[in-house]
Image (cartoon, helix red, strand yellow):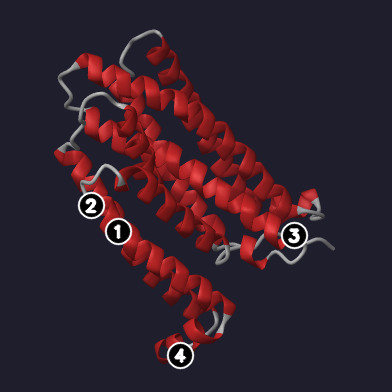
Amino acid sequence: AVGHGTLGLLEARAATPWPPSPRGRQLRWVGAAALLLAPALLLLAQLQALDRSLAEAAELVTETGWGERWLQLALAGAVGAVGVLLPFPWWRSAGAVATAAIVAVAMSGLGHAGADEAWPRLARFVDTGHALAAGGWLGGLALLWADVAKCSDNAILMARWSWFSGAAMLMAPLTFVTGAGNTLLRLAGAPLAATVASDYGRLLALKAALALGVLALGWASHRRARRGAHPASGALRAELLLALAVFAATALLTRSEPPVAP
């Protein structure tokens, strides 16, 4: 959803229309399905973690703070799923970004940031920023790659790549800064030895290494765009595959517990 909104803002700056390619439409359908399915899967995971039955789902949703935030996520996800598939330019910019922001805020209250008792507001703010920056960077990259892969007009193609490359140079550092902030908040006071020895620490190191790989490939593509050359397709595929690996590591990281301070 964030990537979709990012490209909507890009299209608003463009002088010529930019219809999505068949591959881009497929990715948007996948994104819409994820926005609908993710809240349901998250609810099932929470019920399992609390050892509650499916019949107790309504009680969990209506009578707990977690449930209130989950309802916010489910509603924003449903609106976002519809919006991702709409062709209206106004939705592809302001509407998509606003919906993505609501989703990111809701998600920040359902994970580790929502459980932070020392710095609750700061933790959610940093986590929300991380989700928006990473989504705009990597989600936008995936959709952009799909939409311009078959573009025959080199001038239009390079205009889009140049704009997105400049935007990515802002979103990528913001992703790392907010990610570092999340790490400091999660591991505040925890012994280094315990962090290194924990599953959380190992997954965190893996995620950081993969993200640095994405950043290195993105920087190479940015330099090619600055020279007026189209980014290499092989490097773009590698960048997207590494990005998928980062998301997989993030999913595992959210299910593990960080070490606590003694």
Q: Which amino acid does the dot numbered 2 rest on?
A: Leu
Q: Which residue is mark 1?
A: 81
Give the residue number, with chain letter if any, for mark 4.
56
Considering only order in the chain, which callout, 3 or 2, is on the residue closer to the N terminus? 2
Residue found 26% across the figure and 59% down from its top: 82
Q: Is residue 74 above or below residue 13?
A: below
Q: CA distance from mark 1 to mark 2?
A: 7 Å
Spot occupied by residue 30 in the image (x, y as percentages of width and height): 26, 53
* Local secondary structure at mark 2: helix
For residue 255, side relative to residue 23 (left or right): right
In the rendered structure, which disc, 4 or 3, sits on the residue that comes first in sequence?
4
Where's residue 137, x and y in %? 44, 37
Which of the marked residues, 4 or 2, is nearer the chain's N terminus? 4
| Residue positioned 63% across, 53% down in the render | 125
Q: Are dots 4 and 2 in contact, CB under 8 Å?
A: no
Choose the circle earlier in sequence order: 4 or 1: 4
Mark 4 neighbour density, 10 Å: few (under 14) some (14–19) many (20 or more)? few
